[in-house]
Amino acid sequence: MQIDQSKIGEVTVITLNGDLDSNSGGNLKERFGKLFNEGVYEIIVDLRQVPFMDSAGLGHLVNALKMCVHHKGNLMLVGANESIVDLLRITRLDTIFRVYDSPEEAAVAFLP
């Protein structure tokens, strides 16, 4: 999985390309760790190029969301495909994660 990082204003955008699963999730966990060490807790995760996510990948997102919220931030998702949305529904995490169509739309949700 490829991980790219950019900014929209003060919000960090993590763009993933490839499957988010038990094999690739460690790279994402490491990236989140670096962001948290830098004091970054307002994060958008762009999933538009993620064809598949398993429970391990979802676990990394949940743990990152917990850390963000604990530090008065948030983590929002962008572009989740139908299978990822189904995974969120099955696990009832669709009530926890906010999913947007674009990073720009998600970034607006961070504004006061």
Image: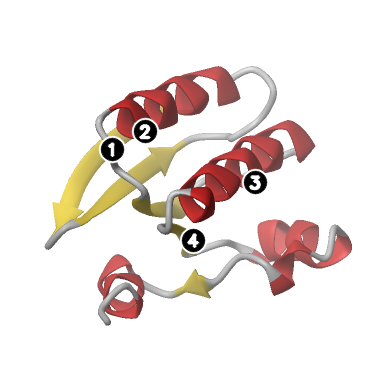
The residue carrying mark 3 is 62
- Say which mark, if any, is on residue 36: 2
Coordinates of residue 55 in the picture (x, y in percent)? 78, 38
Give the Cα distance between marks 3 and 1.
Answer: 18 Å
Q: Nearer the viewer, mark 3 or mark 2?
A: 2
Please rate how many residues cluster around mark 4, counting C-alpha atoms within 10 Å: few if below 14, some from 14 to 19, many from 20. many
| Extreme residue toward the left, this view | 9
| Extreme residue toward the front, this view | 71
Q: Is residue 90 above or below residue 19?
A: below
Q: Is residue 13 left or right of residue 10?
A: right
Coordinates of residue 15 in the picture (x, y in percent)? 34, 45
- Provide the secondary structure element on which disc 2 rests: helix
Please rate how many residues cluster around mark 3, counting C-alpha atoms within 10 Å: few if below 14, some from 14 to 19, many from 20. some
Q: Is residue 27 above or below residue 55?
A: above
- Say which mark, if any, is on residue 39: 1
C-beta proximity under 8 Å, tags 2 and 1: yes
- Provide the secondary structure element on which disc 3 rests: helix
Q: Earlier in the sequence, mark 4 or mark 1?
A: 1
| Residue 1 appears in the rendering | no
Give the Cα distance between marks 2 and 4.
Answer: 18 Å
Specify the quadrant that holds the C terminus.
bottom left
Q: Residue at x 28, y 38 (%)?
A: 39
The residue carrying mark 4 is 77
- Look at label 4 and name its amino acid: Leu
Q: Earlier in the sequence, mark 3 or mark 1?
A: 1
